[in-house]
Image (cartoon, grey):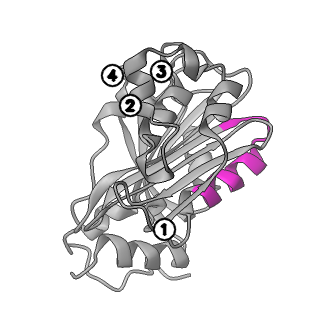
Amino acid sequence: MTDTYWTRPADTRVSGSGECTLTVLAPPRPTSADSFAPHDPVRARAFAADFPTVEEVVEDLGVVPADQVPHPEVRADLDLIAVGHYGGAVCLSDPALADDGTDNTVREAARAVHARHPGSLVVGSAHVDLGEDHIEDVLLLPDGTLLHASGYPGFEDPWESQGDPRAALGALGVDVDLLDEDTQEDLALDGEPHLVNWELVVSLALKGRDPRRHPRLEVSLLRVRHTREHTAAMEELWLLGR
């Protein structure tokens, strides 16, 4: 087995920025991040090893606060993922989830994870600036209903969307009609897909259960070898023009 699928040097500067995460909430779903169990490094590593973008976990770099996960600066940093495993809640950050609308990587990863954890709520998000801002957001409800949006905010095309955000939020106990007027206006659910605030949709779905903003929680920082396919995609997206 090869040590790496990269063709560019490890110190090549990354040309993009952003956050790419996937959160899994298993039944019974916790009501807030305050109720999460302590981080379990052993289960976090096992979750990472089974994640669809990962071929092998190469090294465990220890535990860091969930709100202090480093952002990639050079190519070698693209091999780092962070995983927090809190019993019934798991959150993973992985630059391989970034996409430009070609592969719908977050959607496919969410489907694979949901198949392994049936009955869970899977929330995925990749908001990246790779020359142009591109977003991909996914809600995969416990019953398998999919909400998916992918495109370039502010541009009508190209956009891909599936599902009804109002209905998806309603299924999670969020009645959009009962939200305050400013929040409803910010959501813009009656607009075209490129005008909808998908980041806010995801935030409402998580309802305070996003560990990335929680100073008490910890995550495992892992160096991995991504699959050949995902390494090639990252090289094209994150190292564009380098």
Q: CA distance from mark 2 to mark 4?
A: 27 Å
Residue 230 lies in the magenta-colored region:
no
Q: Which residues are magenta?
A: 107-121
Question: Which residue carries the number 2 mark?
Answer: 186
Q: Is residue 96 left or right of residue 166?
A: left
Q: Earlier in the sequence, mark 2 or mark 4?
A: 2
Instruction: Return the residue at label 4.
Output: 215
Amino acid carrying mark 4 in the image: Pro
Residue occupying image coordinates x 44% and y 53%? 194
Which residue is denoted by mark 3 in the rendering? 208
Q: Nearer the viewer, residue 97 or 159?
A: 159
Which quadrant is the N terminus positioned in? bottom right
- Looking at the picture, how far across and down is residue 16, in whole percent? 26, 63
Q: Quadrant of the C terminus?
A: bottom left
Quarter of the image holding residue 99? bottom left
Instruction: Nearest to the eye among marks 3 and 2: give it.
Output: 2
